[in-house]
Image: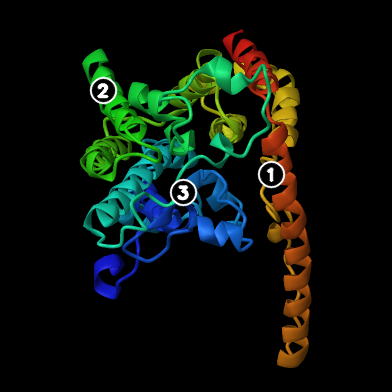
C-alpha cells in the first residue's frame, strides 16, 4: 500500500482522517498544535466545533468519493458500492467518536504536562481547553444554563462538550448494551468529579481518567468503522431519527447544537441523494417517505442554518472553477486579491459567529428538531 511504501496517510479511513484534521481543529500536543488562551487574547478566533464530514465537504473536496472511483480502484480500496454503505454517514459517526478521542488525548497530554512541570506558574490545563461561555456569557436571572444544570460544581469550568454530542447515538448504532452505556457514564462522571476537585480540574486525577476515556473512544470508533456496524439506507434513516430526538432529551450549548445539526444535515443530504438516484424496488418505501417529508424538513433546517451559522465560509464559492492566467506575475496578483477577499469574509464570519453564540438559546433549536422529528415519524 502507498501509505506504508511512500509515507502517505490513508484519508479514506474516517478515523485516520479525523485524527489528522483534529490535530489542528481540536489540538495535538505531540505535534505542537495547541491553541492557547494567550493566542485568543492576541486575536486568534476561538476554535469552532469540529465535525469531520462537514469540514471535509466544505474544503471543498478536491478528490473523488469512493462511490465516484472506478471499479478497479474501489476493489483496491475494498469498497463495494452495494455493501459498504453510505460513505459520508460513516465519516459522521466514526468521526464524531474519533473527535472525542482526540479531545481526551489532548486533555491527557496537558494534564501530564501539568503533573510533570516544575514551573509552579503552570499548575492547570490551558484555559482554552474549557468552554469559553462558562465565563464569557451574560448574567441573567433566568438562564437556560442554570435550568439545564451543571455536571461539575457550579462555577467550575467544564471542558467543551460538543465532541460528546453524538456519543449516545454512536453507542446505540454500535449495539452497546445497557452495561456498556453505564460503564461510559461512570467514566464520564469520574472525569467531571476531577474537574470539580478544584478550579480547572486536578491534573493528577484528570490524566488517567482522560486516558481511559480516550481508549474507550478508540475502541468504539474502530468498531463503528468496520463490520458488523452497517451504513445502509435503512440504518442512515434510523440515525436521522435518533439525532432528531436528541434535543428533546438534552439541553445543548451552541457548539453542541451545531454538531448535531451538522451531523444530521450530512446524513440527510447523502441519504436523500442516494434514494432519489436509486431504482431498486427495495428502496421505494423509504424513498417515498423521505421525499414526502422533504418540504417539512427544509424549513427547520434552513432556520438552523441561519441561527447557528452552519454554512462554513466559502463552502459554495470554493466549488466555483476559477481561470488563472498563465503569466506568473498576473497569477500571483490575482491570488493575492483572492486572499484579501477571503480574509474579508473571515473577518465578518467570526464576529458574527461569536454574536450568534452570545445570543443563543436552546429553545429555537429544540423546536426546529422537534418539527424534524415529527416529519420523520410520519
Query: Hey, which quadrant is residue 255 in on the image?
Result: top right
Q: Which residue is mark 2?
A: 186
| 116 sits left or right of 43 in the view | left
The crowd level at tag 2 (other Cα within 10 Å; few <14, some 14-19, many 20+) is few
Residue at the image position 72 percent from the left and 72 percent from the top:
339
- Please tell me whether mark 2 sits on a helix, a strand or a loop: helix
Structural crowding at the residue carrying mark 1, measured as other residues with C-alpha within 10 Å and reported as few (<14), some (14–19) or many (≥20): some
Left or right, 284 with respect to 347, comes to left
- The Cα atoms of the two marked residues, 2 and 3, are separated by 25 Å
Can see residue 47?
A: yes
Looking at this view, is 233 or 296 the one in front? 296
Q: Earlier in the sequence, mark 3 or mark 1?
A: 3
**Quadrant assignment for the N terminus:** bottom left
Quadrant of the rendered structure where residue 10 is? bottom left
Q: List x then y, in percent, for residue 348.
A: 77, 54
Query: Measured from the top left, where is residue 354 in percent x and y?
Result: 69, 44
374 left or right of 335 in image = left
**Residue positioned 24% across, 37% down in the render:** 209
* Residue that badge 1 annotates: 354
Q: Please tell me whether residue 273 is drawn above or below residue 46 in the rendered image.
A: above
Q: What percent of the width, then of the height, locates residue 52?
A: 48, 46
The residues tagged by marks 3 and 1 sit, at their Cα atoms, a distance apart of: 18 Å
Which mark is nearer the camera, 2 or 3?
A: 3
Q: How many marks?
A: 3
**Is any part of residue 176 visible from this angle?**
no
Judging depth in this view, the residue of 38 and 26 nearest the camera is 38
Q: Which residue is mark 3?
A: 127
Q: Nearer the viewer, mark 3 or mark 1?
A: 3
**Disc 3 element:** helix
Amino acid at each position: 500500500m502507498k501509505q506504508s511504501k511512500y509515507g502517505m496517510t490513508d484519508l479514506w479511513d474516517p478515523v485516520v482522517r479525523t485524527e489528522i484534521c483534529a490535530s489542528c481543529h481540536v489540538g495535538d500536543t505531540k505535534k505542537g498544535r495547541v491553541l492557547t488562551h494567550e493566542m485568543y487574547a492576541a486575536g486568534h478566533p476561538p476554535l469552532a466545533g469540529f465535525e469531520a464530514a462537514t469540514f471535509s465537504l466544505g474544503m471543498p473536496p478536491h478528490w473523488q468519493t469512493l462511490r465516484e472511483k472506478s471499479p478497479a480502484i474501489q476493489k483496491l480500496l475494498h469498497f463495494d458500492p452495494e455493501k459498504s454503505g453510505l460513505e459520508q454517514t460513516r465519516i459522521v459517526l466514526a468521526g464524531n467518536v474519533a473527535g472525542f478521542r482526540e479531545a481526551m488525548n489532548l486533555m491527557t497530554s496537558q494534564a501530564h504536562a501539568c503533573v510533570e512541570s516544575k514551573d509552579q506558574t503552570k499548575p492547570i490545563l490551558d484555559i482554552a481547553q474549557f468552554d469559553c461561555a462558562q465565563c464569557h456569557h451574560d448574567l441573567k436571572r433566568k438562564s437556560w444554563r442554570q435550568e439545564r444544570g451543571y455536571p461539575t460544581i457550579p462555577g467550575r469550568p467544564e471542558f467543551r462538550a460538543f465532541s460528546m454530542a453524538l456519543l449516545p447515538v454512536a453507542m446505540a448504532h454500535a449495539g452497546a448494551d445497557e452495561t456498556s452505556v453505564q460503564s461510559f457514564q461512570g467514566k464520564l462522571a469520574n472525569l467531571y468529579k476531577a474537574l470539580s476537585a478544584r478550579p480547572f480540574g486536578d491534573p493528577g486525577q484528570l490524566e488517567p481518567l482522560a486516558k481511559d476515556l480516550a481508549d474507550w473512544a478508540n475502541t468504539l470508533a474502530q468498531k463503528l468503522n468496520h463490520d458488523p456496524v452497517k451504513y445502509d439506507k435503512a440504518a442512515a434513516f434510523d440515525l436521522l431519527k435518533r439525532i432528531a430526538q436528541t434535543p428533546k432529551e438534552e439541553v445543548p450549548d451552541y457548539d453542541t447544537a451545531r454538531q448535531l445539526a451538522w451531523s444530521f444535515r450530512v446524513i440527510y443530504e447523502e441519504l436523500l441523494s442516494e434514494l432519489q438516484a436509486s431504482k431498486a424496488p427495495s428502496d421505494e418505501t423509504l424513498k417515498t417517505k423521505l421525499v414526502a417529508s422533504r418540504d417539512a424538513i427544509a424549513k427547520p433546517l434552513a432556520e438552523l442554518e441561519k441561527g447557528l451559522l452552519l454554512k462554513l465560509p466559502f463552502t459554495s464559492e470554493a466549488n466555483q472553477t476559477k481561470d488563472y492566467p498563465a503569466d506568473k506575475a498576473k497569477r500571483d496578483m490575482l491570488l493575492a486579491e483572492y486572499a484579501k477577499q477571503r480574509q474579508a469574509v473571515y473577518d465578518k464570519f467570526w464576529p458574527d459567529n461569536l454574536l450568534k453564540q452570545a445570543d443563543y438559546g436552546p429553545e429555537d433549536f429544540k423546536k426546529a428538531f422537534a418539527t424534524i422529528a415529527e416529519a420523520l415519524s410520519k
